[in-house]
Amino acid sequence: MTAIIDYQQAYEGEDVILADIPTSSELERWANVVLAYEGVSEQEITVRFTDEVESQALNFEYRGKEKPTNVLSFPFEAPPGIEMNLLGDLVICAPVISREAKEQQKAVVDHYAHMTVHGLLHLMGYDHIEDADAEEMESKEIEILAQLGIDDPYQ
């Protein structure tokens, strides 16, 4: 299972937040664990790190919510008859991740890993709208994060 990461670092804010943004290698490692867990072969994923302004604009445009959010997932849908190993795009808001990690008393890198795993599962078609779907998705997140040595984020 090989993840090909198209890394886009668009956040230009505070140095302390910039310092915590994961490297392409970290993202690749996390994505490879998700792909292996789901039995999915090589996939390309764009991961873009943004500020709150861009996150809020995208969240409003695509979800009708007027606030920045931790991660947005945009699955790729190939035209009929075209096969591509492009899973989709993740847009991760660095200041939101940093703030949430502090509020939840988690290591920032662990929260980035969790939100990356969460976003990748969304790209693979999982959601958490219905309670049963949320339980399934959270269970997968917990198992995948355990493989990465990260504690249950829902504790």
Image (spheres, rainbow, N blue to C red):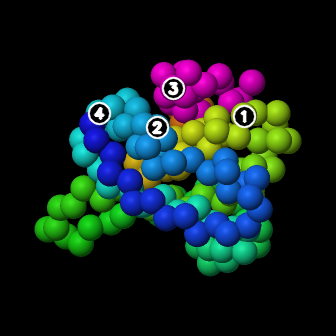
Q: Does 90 sit above or below residue 12? A: above
The answer to whether 135 appears left or right of 108 in the picture is: left
* Tag 2 residue: 30
Q: Circles 1 and 3: CB distance less than 8 Å?
A: no
* Tag 4 residue: 39
The answer to whether 152 appears left or right of 91 in the picture is: right
Amino acid type, label 2 = Trp
- Quarter of the view holding residue 132: top right
Q: Secondary structure at mark 4?
A: loop
Q: Residue at x 76, y 33 (%)?
A: 106
Amino acid type, label 3 = Leu
* Disc on the earlier residue, 3 or 2: 2
Which of these two is toward me, 39 or 106? Answer: 106
The span from disc 3 to disc 4 (Cα, nearest Å) is: 17 Å
The answer to whether 131 appears left or right of 77 in the picture is: right
* Disc on the earlier residue, 3 or 4: 4
Q: Secondary structure at mark 3?
A: loop
Q: Circles 3 and 2: CB distance less than 8 Å?
A: yes
Disc sitting over residue 107 in the figure: 1
* Tag 3 residue: 148
Task: Name the quadrant of the C terminus.
Answer: top right
The span from disc 3 to disc 2 (Cα, nearest Å) is: 7 Å
Check if residue 143 falls in the magenta segment.
yes
The span from disc 4 to disc 2 (Cα, nearest Å) is: 14 Å
Q: Which residues are magenta?
A: 138-155
| Label 3: few (<14), some (14–19) or many (≥20) C-alpha neighbours in 10 Å | some
